[in-house]
Image (cartoon, grey):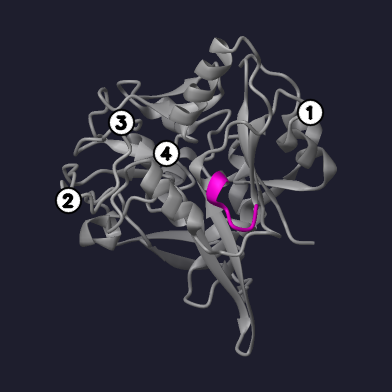
Amino acid sequence: MGKRSQKKFDFHIFLVENNLNTELPKKFTYQFDTVWLGNKGEIMAMDREQKKGFDRRRFLKVGGAGLALLALEGHLKRVSPEEILPKSKAKRRYAMVIDLRRCIGCESCTVACKVENNIPPDNYGEPARKISWNEVIFKEEGRYPFTKRRFWPRPCMHCENPPCTKVCPVRATYKDEERGLVLQRYERCIGCRYCAVACPYGARYFNWSKPSREDKGEVYFNPDVEIRNKGVVEKCLFCVHLIKKAEEMAKREKREIEDGEIKPACVLTCMGNARFFGDLNDPESQVSKLLRSGPAFRFEEYLGTEPKVFYLLPR
């Protein structure tokens, strides 16, 4: 981690990534008691007392600027199995566990997600308008030659208490109570991007261009995934189309869905077997056992979103 400053000062937060492309100021100015600074001067974590005063207006501004991604490790909080494993109203609570001890940063999850969900691979030639439902964030520590790199895979967190659903004026984003997922109704979306501003994880993307299909077969097209039109917000859905397929097959065969039967594209292609997907309501599922077996962490826990993506850290 970078150097630490303990004196009170005004720190200028520059917009790192503005997926909204709205008329936002070039920088924000806040006052912090303690700030961790990265190698390029970016904010890595805030003082705990400052977090307590982190009101809704600042929450929305910082979330919209995509700055939450810079403070991931500083905002990790350990969770106990008692907090997350009890049964809820949802019939199922699908969740993901990512073992950072196994992640090698190959980004095969990112590529697989793009192929499976018809996401443009070239970001339309504009990095600021990229669409990456399943992103891997790289973080370097130390000074050359004693350096190391960490990898932070970041899908949608599918929060138990998602802020994005509360700000959508047309209910285009909603929580599926049957599966515990945060899903999208693209035909309802009006492109206001309130949900993208409210998401503290930067997991929502605005679609700036019309979808296109190459007749020559140069671009893979998955007919099972809905094509998003220009002017809507999209995000990771935990490959809900694969979940529905498994549900239909289990219904035809008159049986329950088995643990491990459902594998989103990122889980299926992970070279290090670092990702696990399953039902938290099933105490015998692999994700439940992993969360009981050792310390698990969630990002931005203090915001009360209760994300359902959990991380196992290197010891």
Q: Mark 3 vs mark 4: which is more N-terminal?
A: 4
Outermost residue to the right:
293
| Amino acid, disc 1 | Glu
Q: What secondary structure is marked by label 1?
A: loop
Rounded to the nearest angstrom, the CA distance separating label 1 from label 4 is 34 Å
Residue 151 place in picture, x, y as percent = 58, 63
Q: Residues within 10 Å of mark 4 (few under 14, many from 20)?
A: many
Q: What secondary structure is marked by label 3?
A: loop
Tell me if residue 74 can be seen.
yes
Tell me if residue 68 can be seen.
no
Report if residue 276 lies within the magenta region: no
Q: Can you identify the residue that label 3 sits on?
A: 226
Q: Can you identify the residue that label 1 sits on?
A: 284
Placement of the N terminus among the 4 image quadrants: bottom right
Question: To which quarter of the image does residue 148 belong?
Answer: bottom right
Q: Mark 2 vs mark 1: which is more N-terminal?
A: 2
Q: Can you identify the residue that label 4 sits on?
A: 198
Q: What secondary structure is marked by label 4?
A: helix
Rounded to the nearest angstrom, the CA distance separating label 1 from label 3 is 33 Å
In the displayed structure, does residue 293 sit left or right of residue 25? right
Q: Nearer the viewer, mark 3 or mark 4?
A: 3
Q: Nearer the viewer, residue 131 or 217?
A: 217
In the displayed structure, does residue 129 sit left or right of residue 160? left
